[in-house]
Amino acid sequence: MKTRKLLIALVLGMGTATAWAGETEERPLYKDSLAPIESRVEDLLRRMTLHEKTLQLQNRPVGRIDEIESIFQGQSYGCTHEMGKTAEECAGIYNELQKYMLTKTRLGIPILTAVEGIQGILQNNSTLFPHSIAQGSTFNPELIERMTDAAGKEAAAMGIHQVLSPVFDIARELRWGRVEETYGEDPFLISEMGIGFVKGYQKHQITCTPKHFVAHGTPAGGLNCAFVSGGEREFRSIYLYPFARVIKETNPLCIMSCYSAYDGIPVSASPYYMTDVLRDELGFKGYVYSDWGSVGRVMTFHYAVPTREEAAKVSLIAGV
């Protein structure tokens, strides 16, 4: 319930003034920016059907401007992404998409726009910086904050709300093919770099998404998505440490869940990891964003449930 209310509160703050444009009838409470956020959230939730609430949990990729109607068909989804266009094209698409959400859907809920941003914004013609392993070698969190400050300006100009970074995986298995996405093998260094990373984007009200919660980067045999083993001591002293630090010191609005299992338990379907540890112990107050495919893999990779629908159910209940 708290997570659902947070998501609604985020989108309420994204386009209130635009949502009023052209309205002549009495304004709904949830569109009144002067009303308390909690009251606006409750008002909007009461108006939403179960189907509309379910769509708010989903990512719907956007295409060209002329494809918006055929893709969204008057439905308001929770978030979207675009990875093939230039920065200028992306800005135009997102501008039109937000207008569509506000004027062509029943409740006028804006959509959260997400992008990869580990080394700058991953849209064509955006500025790219050295990859994370090179960033880590600088031992300079202030420099990383300057980097994401610059990238955050570009993201804000494009209408991007959420960056799917930084990566807090720990490079202890060099056969793993994604070592370059990490800051290295030391949890303290990873924490320092991650804190600087998040602070730079936050200057522009860009939501960062520390990932992959948790213990994703040391898979058995170096195979991406394979299970990780280590026990409670390694879990808490090594893998959990960067997340605990960044949550305490930067209060990020989002965390990404991982594909993998820790000691045989699929993390994205685990109330222990996603709620007991992340929320109750670490004090995380935001929402959990699944890695693309991590929910489906509860069935297709971990064989923990028999259907995709059941995978969605158990992950949602767990806290994703």
Image: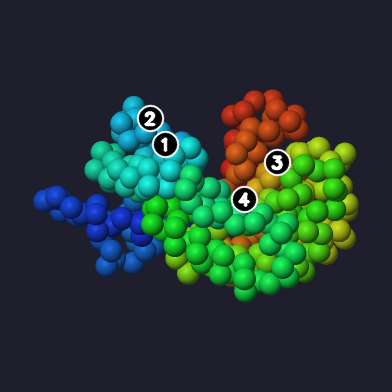
Query: In screen coordinates, is 279 left or right of 29?
Result: right
Residue at image x 76%, y 39%? Answer: 224
Reading the chain from its start, which is encountered first: label 1 or label 2? 1
Check if mark 1's residue and mark 2's residue have beta carbons within 8 Å.
yes
The kind of secondary structure element at disc 4 is: strand
Depth order, front residue of 117/249: 117
Q: Could you tell me how far apart the alpha carbons at marks 1 and 2 are, in whole angstroms?
A: 7 Å
Q: Could you tell me how far apart the alpha carbons at marks 2 and 3 are, in whole angstroms?
A: 27 Å
Query: In screen coordinates, is 64 left or right of 180?
Result: left
The three-letter code of the residue at mark 2 reads Ile
Q: Mark 4 — residue?
A: 256
Residue at image x 45%, y 56%? Answer: 155
Estimate the x, y position of residue 136 in percent, counting from the top left.
Answer: 72, 63
In the rendered structure, find residue 71 and report the number of the disc placed on it. Answer: 2
Q: Could you tell me how far apart the alpha carbons at marks 4 and 2 are, in whole angstroms?
A: 25 Å
| Count of numbered labels shown in the rendering | 4
Binning the other alpha carbons within 10 Å of mark 1 as few (below 14), some (14 to 19) or many (20 upward) gives many
Estimate the x, y position of residue 268 in percent, counting from the top left.
Answer: 68, 44
Reading the chain from its start, which is encountered first: label 1 or label 3? 1
The three-letter code of the residue at mark 1 reads Val
Check if mark 2's residue and mark 3's residue have beta carbons within 8 Å.
no
The kind of secondary structure element at disc 3 is: loop
Q: Mark 1 — residue?
A: 62
Reading the chain from its start, which is encountered first: label 1 or label 4? 1
The kind of secondary structure element at disc 2 is: helix
